[in-house]
Image (cartoon, coloured by chain):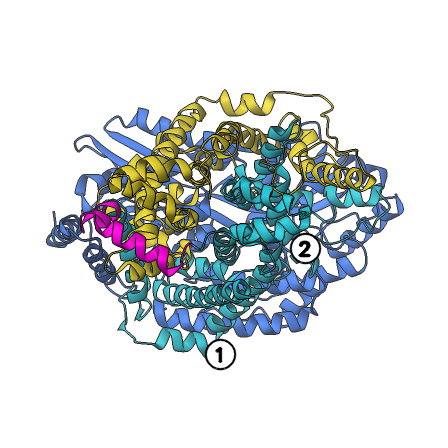
Chain colours: A cyan, B yellow, C blue
Amino acid sequence: MSSAAPSLSPPRRDSPVAAGGARRHLRSGSPVTPYLFLGPFLILFTVFVLAPILVLAWSSTRQWILGFDSGGFVGWANYASLLSGEGVLSEEFWRGMRVTAIFTVLSVPLLVTIPFALALLLNLRFRGRTVFRALYFAPYVLGVAVVGVLWHFLLDAQVGPVNHLLGALGLPDSIAWTTSLPAAWVSLVGVTVWWTVGFNAVIYLAALQEVPAELYEAARVDGAGAWRRLWTVTIPHMHRVLQFVVVITIIASANMYGQSALITNEQPGGATRTAIGYIAQTGMQSYDIGMASAMSMALALCLILASLLVNQLFRFVGKV
Amino acid sequence: MSAVLPTRRRPLQPRRIALWVLIIALTAVFAMPLLYMLSTAFKTPAESVSPDFRIWPQEPTLGAFRQILGDDSVPVLRWVGNSLLVAVAHSALTVTLAVLAAYALARMEFRGRRLMMGAILATMFVPAVVMLIPHFLIVNSLGWLNSYAALIIPGAAGAFGVFFLRQFFAGIPRELEEAAIVDGCTQWSTFARIMLPLARPAIATLVVLSFLSSWNDYLWPVYVLFSGDMQTLPSGLRLLQAENTTRYDVMMAGAVIASVPVLALYVAAQRWIIEGVSTSGIKG
Amino acid sequence: MTPTTHSRHARGIDRRHLLAGAGAAGTALTAAACSSGQSIGGSEEPPAAAPFFGTYDGPDVTITFWNGFTGGDGPYMKQLVADFTEANPAITVEQSSLEWPDLYSKVVTATDAGSGPDVAALHLDQLASFAARGTIIPLDDLTASLDLTESDFTPAVWQGGVFQDRRYGIPLDMFTLAQYWSAPMLASAGLESGPVTAGEFATATDSLRSSGVDHPFWISPDNWQIFVSLLGQFGGTLYSEDRATVTFGDEAGVKALTWMCDLVSDGVSPSDATDLATAFKNGSSAMIHELLWLINDIADTAEDMEYGIGPFPTIGDEPGVFANSHHFALTKQADADEDRGQAARMFISWMSENSATWAGSGNIPARASAREDEAFTDGRQAALATDDVLDSYLFLQQVPGSREIAADSYQRAVSRAVLGEEEPEAALASAVTTAQEMLDRNRELYDF
């Protein structure tokens, strides 16, 4: 990147000069202006996001099962028993965390790169591209219930069309896509990519519009090929959006549970039940709010650590 | 506007042809399940589970659609109306709040900005599924159960929209704003005249995404809606499914009915996301 | 109004007042959280409601009724409710049909908030879970005043509605595991009807295979109901009688699960089959064991299919088959208002008495009188309701939290063993450890 001509590098948005200048000018407005902009959002945010989360944090320190005399404040006990690795709750939670981790590690790279390639493709001018764009976005328009039921049927080892089709092509036709490992991982990741590819692609598409056309022209004049332009213009310019996409994709993958509830039915023997699947069972079926809250907090903490890591990675890559 | 591949006409090289063949093949694979879905919606119940998987139904029928639309006890059109109303209001509110907040967070200096941004971001990591019960209690104490407000408002102040737009605003060069302020624009007019048009692709994208998240959500509607009349499309269509059976034909017909409005919105919004921008012209 | 009802009433209002008055959401939540502790524990004496005399003559009132009868069951329940309203014009019933898992995941919070149902239809095996939480209240007063006894139903389903010596449900219907077979496929193998003993079952699958059916009987990793049936047939139970010890890992359990796994290893069933109904309808499988919903499903999606239906075969030492039931239950919310409480009781007793048309849903009416009605005797499920078969019904024991225990223990063991991931004995052994620990925890929490 450092080899790029100065005219090619994106403006340094965070350079001290620019930031200082902006600060001076923007400060010239009334000091309450920022709060007027933020006010409406913050009110709803406090009531519907912050307050429930604080309640969750509070209830994670209590023994609280709906409908029962609560044992009251238990301090870190819920967390301690989760961390102990002993007992069904702890074992099942960490089993779910492992499933979530495997799914996240397998799916995030694909969900970040494939939509990017797709967005580059869909950003081209060619005949019929509106159909193309709508087509690739179409699966995401379907709800998880439809996607789950559809693929459960398509992937059924015995009566499903996928194995039928593979057989017709002379390929192995008895793969247990939903009831054996590692085939179930392929199914879950594959279906998730098919389903949500349009989501990240549409975000990338919006970001591609923000890359100044002049930069491409300049690069072309400098004799840069398509591949070089991608690395010296497009990607550096989209770095914030890439970071955004990576973080929200990690969060989305870690929140996966509809697919494993509906497609693999948590088979074989609960081996594809995710952490969220177990949290939902604990909170919504056993009504064990205290434990479910502690699990959620633990999961959130792991995710925050993961995304801080991503953040560092971006900083590191940005410096290279 | 092309990003990577040059637009000027060139003789077709074998590599380019191979690339396009690959793209078309992948698209075909991608589209197959959709086609299968679409055709299942026009199949008879018996054919929808038959072992010879035809893409073109043997005896195409509108039976599944008739079953959904013709049943008096299933007010599908009312559900479509509910869903539309809720999704439009929800996305309008979400985007308005997020645009204002994201701009302030991206571009204004004030006490506690970093802390606020950090707090907003941190909330994204808490799994949504455990929020159902606290949300239910709040909505109940506000007296909003079984109302549109319960569907429109609680989800509108999520961190996603703010984080999303902040990343875009932060990517717009500061020089543009500085120039506007030097020219005597107020903060508000800088925001409204300079920043909003520049962020149009991002805003249009957020409209589509937040419309969709409301349109497809069924967990929350199922939790706070009680009467049949108030259901949204996805929560209502669930009622067509029995406990153990799946009527694939009916389910897919329902999915077709539910998808068409959103796909239409997406195609319409594309003009705002992609085509409209080149005219705004003020880049870098 | 007795003093007890009065104080319950007042307390209900008080809490709602507290919730409404709390301005900040955080305060409201705290209040709701703290008040969750005031529900009735199983060991406490329940407050007596005003006596019910079998009629409702109060002012016009609206009650809320939740059930999970979506899909094909829905219209029959809707009709039944409409008939009730016609016969009892003073009572308006607001019916909410939602999927069973949704119903179970919101009924506790909704009832605590006073916005849930007054009457709910629940599965028999779920009564203990919601009774222990105080969401549903005892109905002994109702059954005493109506003079209902087990002879009005069947002994097993009637006893199934009792938890800790109190009745929490009035049975509406029963459903069970049935044997379905394709009539033409059996005929071409020289068989007239489905097998009824272990020997006949083996002969039947052999003849079907020699007639050219590769896999005549399909079994899936989700077929835990077969396991529960066979467990009973071999003399075992899921839990000991005092519900303190997990017993499904005993010899009976191992025999039951081994029989299931042998079907796959002998090739009678293909491996990794999950969609049995589709396989049966499209002629891949000649026989399956499935619940009664399949009757209406075949009528809807494969009306020309010629099939037979009969009782689950006796593979073990004595007959026995998994059965479950939908019960009417009264929630604590109903008694917040005396008229509503009375109307809700009226609703339950009328619905139970007039349940004959419910047979159209494919279930077996629980009420003995309804089982004599032509609406039922003409239905195909009547074959599963002869006296002998009814006697072999095995209802799940009333254990609070039993569904979560089941999901993480024996259902998982069945799945793993049938999929060939683990030997039956080992799969059951680890499931017993899990189940025992969950049971111990629940016994402590729910005090049973």
**Local SS, label 2:** helix
Whether residue B250 is visible to the viewer of this picture, yes or no, is yes
Q: Nearer the viewer, residue C227 or B208?
A: B208
Numbered range of the magenta stretch = A13-39
Tell me, for residue A32, which label it has, or none. Answer: none
Kindly report which numbered mark, 2 or 1, lies closer to the viewer in this rendering: 2
- Name which residue type carries label 2: Val
> Percent position (x, y) of residue A300?
42, 64
> Percent position (x, y) of residue B144?
25, 40
Q: Is residue B56 above or below residue B19?
A: above
Image point (41%, 76%), residue name: A81
Is tag 2's residue or tag 1's residue first in the polypeptide sequence? 1
Based on the picture, tell me whether residue A37 belongs to the magenta stretch: yes
Whether residue C392 is visible to the viewer of this picture, yes or no, is no
Mark 2 belongs to chain: A
Q: Quadrant of the N terminus of chain A?
A: bottom right
Q: Which of A16 and A261 is in front in this view?
A: A16
- Give the residue pinned by disc 1: A86
Indicate the quadrant where residue B45 lies: top right
Based on the picture, tell me whether residue A197 belongs to the magenta stretch: no
What's the magenta bit mostly, secondary-structure-wise?
A: helix
> Percent position (x, y) of residue B147?
29, 36
Image point (38%, 39%), residue name: C352
- Give the residue pinned by disc 2: A186
